[in-house]
Each structure stands twice: as C-alpha cells, then as structure tokens.
Image (cartoon, grey):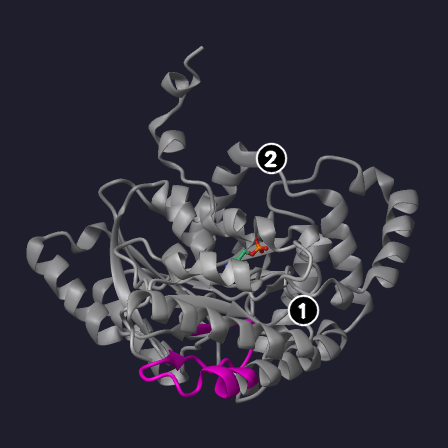
Amino acid sequence: MNYESKLSCVARGIKSSIIRELLKVANDPGMISFGGGVPDPDTFPRHKMAEIAKDIIENEYKFVLQYGTTEGDQELMQGYIDLLKKYENIDWLNYDNMVITVGSQQALYLIGITLLDEESYCAVSRPIYLGAASAFVQRNPHFINVPLLKDGIDLDYLENELEKLKKEGNIDKFKFTYVVSNFHNPAGVSMGLEKRKKLVELAKKYDFLIIEDDPYGALRFEGEKVDTIYSLAPDRTILLNTFSKVLSPGLRLGVVIGPKEIVRRVTMVKQAADLATPSLTQRLAAKFINENDLMEEIKPTIKLYREKKDSMMKAMKKHLGDIKGIDWTYPEGGLFTWVTLPKEFDTMEMFEIAKKEKVLYIPGVAFYVDEPDKNTMRISFCLPTHEEIDEGMKRLRNSINKYAEQKGIEL
Ligand SMILES: Cc1ncc(COP(=O)(O)O)c(C=O)c1O
C-alpha cells in the first residue's frame, strides 16, 4: 500500500526532530553529551513522590483512576494559584484563568490551533525553542523572525516589522509575539524589566497577545528576579508554566494562565485533543506542592546547576577563549549557553567530527524557522559531571581545530 498517499499535508510536512536523531549516540560508551536539556534525574524527589503515589492510589482512587475535567484538578490549580501569589505577587487568579496541560509542549500546540491560521502572522525569536517552532509550524503561519540579543528579542526590529505590516494593511492578522522570558532555550539569555515593559507597550500599540513561556524562571542561580510579563499585562499575556524543570518532566504537567476568554478556547481545543490531563499525575503534583515548599525543595537543584554552570563557563574560557570571533552567552539560570563560532563554521557538518571525538552538542540549525545561522550551537550543562564538562570542552576544542584544519579556517 502507498501509505504516503494517505497522509495529510501536515503529517507529510513534519520532519523528525534533529535533536532526537543526533542524540541517538548519547549513550555510547565514553560519550560526553552537552546535548539534551533534560533535568538531572537525581534531582527528582522520588521517595516523597513514591509515598504520595501509593497513598493517593489506595485512598483517592475514585479521583486519580477516573476521568477528570478538561480544565484540570482543582487541588492542583489551587496549589498553583497559591504558588503564584507567594512567589510572583499574582493575586488575582481564579480557576477560569487556567487550564492544566500535558506539559508546556501541549500548551504550545493548543495555542497554535487556538490562535493561528495560514494567513496569520506571529513573531518569534531567532533562535527559537524547537518545540514551539514545531507546534507553530504545523499551522503554517507567516513568521516574523526577530533577532535575539543578550537581553531578549530586538524590539526595534519587531516594531519596524509591525509598522510594515500596518502599512500593508495586515496588522489585524498579527496574533502574538512568543518569548521565553527567563533563561531562554536554546540561548540562555533573559529579558530585562525595561524590555518587558516596552514589549507590553508594543502589544498595546499594535494590539497583539504575548505568549510568555517560562519553564526555567524558578531555576535562577544569580541576579535579581524580574516580574513576569504576565504580571505586567495580564489582559494580553498568556503565561505558560511547567513542572518539568522544577519537579519532574515525567509527570507531563504544565499550565496555561491567561485571560479567561482565551483560556476557555484553549480548553475547548484541548478537549478534542485528549479530554483531560491524567488525574493521577495532577493529584500527585498537587499533594507534593501542598505538602512541601517547592522553592525550598529546588534549592539543592539550583545549587547543583549553578556549580555546573560555573564549571562550564570556566571550561569554555580555558578551552575556547582564544578563538578569534567566538562568542557565548552567560546564563543566570536555566540549563543552556549558546555558542557562536566564527561565520565560516557549520556546526552540523562539524558534528560528525565531534561524534568521533566523543562529545555532543546541538547544532544551531535545529532552532530556526528561517535561514539558520549555521555557526551556532546549544550547549547544555545539566547532565555531565564537573570532570566531564572540562574533558568535553577539551574534546569540543579538538573538534573545532580539526574542522578548521579541514576547511582551511584560520583560528
Ligand atoms: C522553552 C520551553 N518551552 C516548553 C518546553 C516544554 O516543556 P514540557 O516538558 O513542560 O512540555 C521546554 C522544554 O524543554 C522549553 O525549554
């Protein structure tokens, strides 16, 4: 049978994730991976979670083993409302402002369906979080690709593009600007308060929504905490949060917070996708956050990542620091730094050499919905040990040297 002929255009257009393909060799013996952005499993509070799981399956089986509502478990919603009140000074939320999703990835997908048509426009950063790109690309909208600077997206560029759309008479088709406000994946950079305010001003002026994706905000190692964009403009921001980086990604729990009119539509779209997020993991997370101070619980995790970030910055300076024209970002939190090599480099091509040198990274091409900057790469410091970070950087430098030699690039 010709299965291909039965596929939809969308399914035919989907490419398999570059990351998944590249990281197939991550578990090869002796390999050091700066690739995956997954949390260190030793940070999961497994013993406490095991106790809660046993308790709720035995005693709350009528809820946890049953279908739930599409909106989500109200015990978890309340726990989340309390967390946001305590840590973000957001004290106006009620259940109508939120829907629990299967991770933030589902939220991105649902938002794509809820807001984007083929003729729609949306603004994204370049580079962009790969999962957001794959969710939005399926709707085939027009992308405005805004350069990402060290303090967030280039708002002058964005405004210029919006002016052009206005002149063309297309500004009413512009739906949203998508940002990762803290410790961007893949770039490691954050948006400062003044810029957040300026973005809100633009959103009001040109009448668009802001999608604020914030999986890493709680993982701050240093610097001052900054107000969420959502708290600056709750009537036109949709905040995405997730338990993946602060508790466990295996729970697959995220939350969409926003104006109730939008949340209601997202909920209706979700109903068609899966009826409801699993009751079991929702109640497990609810009990965990109600019985423990989540921010206290993650302090050791933050310490662990801070130390690894320090080792990574030190190793980069030591092994890469003398390369003319190299640049990398300094993350104040999160899991990533973004490296830009001299423009003659193609990190996808160099990947084969790196694999032989037994070090992995993610080539930057994975993070663009337009023509990629091929000389970039994402480096993650969350999984390797301190020794592996230094050794891996040494291997990366060897790979850079070998590639440069092959291509006749002067370093
Ligand atoms: C920026 C960003 N958004 C969303 C997600 C998806 O997270 P989740 O595990 O909640 O689906 C990730 C995961 O790495 C991410 O980095």
**What stretch of residues is rendered in magenta?**
315-338
Residue 196 is covered by the magenta coloring: no
Q: Is residue 237 left or right of residue 75?
A: left
Q: Residue at x 39, y 65 (%)?
A: 179
Q: Amino acid at mark 2?
A: Leu
Q: Which residue is mark 1?
A: 82
Query: Depth check: 92 or 294 in front?
Result: 294
Query: Depth check: 135 or 212 in front?
Result: 135
Residue 31 lies, with reference to residue 84, above or below; the image says above
Residue 99 lies, with reference to residue 313, above or below; the image says above
The C terminus appears in which quarter of the rendering? bottom left
Q: Is residue 248 left or right of residue 195?
A: right
Q: Residue at x 39, y 20 (%)?
A: 4
Q: Which residue is mark 2?
A: 275
Distance between the alpha carbons at the discs numbered 1 and 2: 26 Å
Query: Depth check: 343 or 383 in front?
Result: 343
Local crowd size for mark 2, using a 10 Å CA cut-off: few (<14), some (14–19), many (≥20): some
**Residue 82 locus on image (x, y percent):** 67, 69
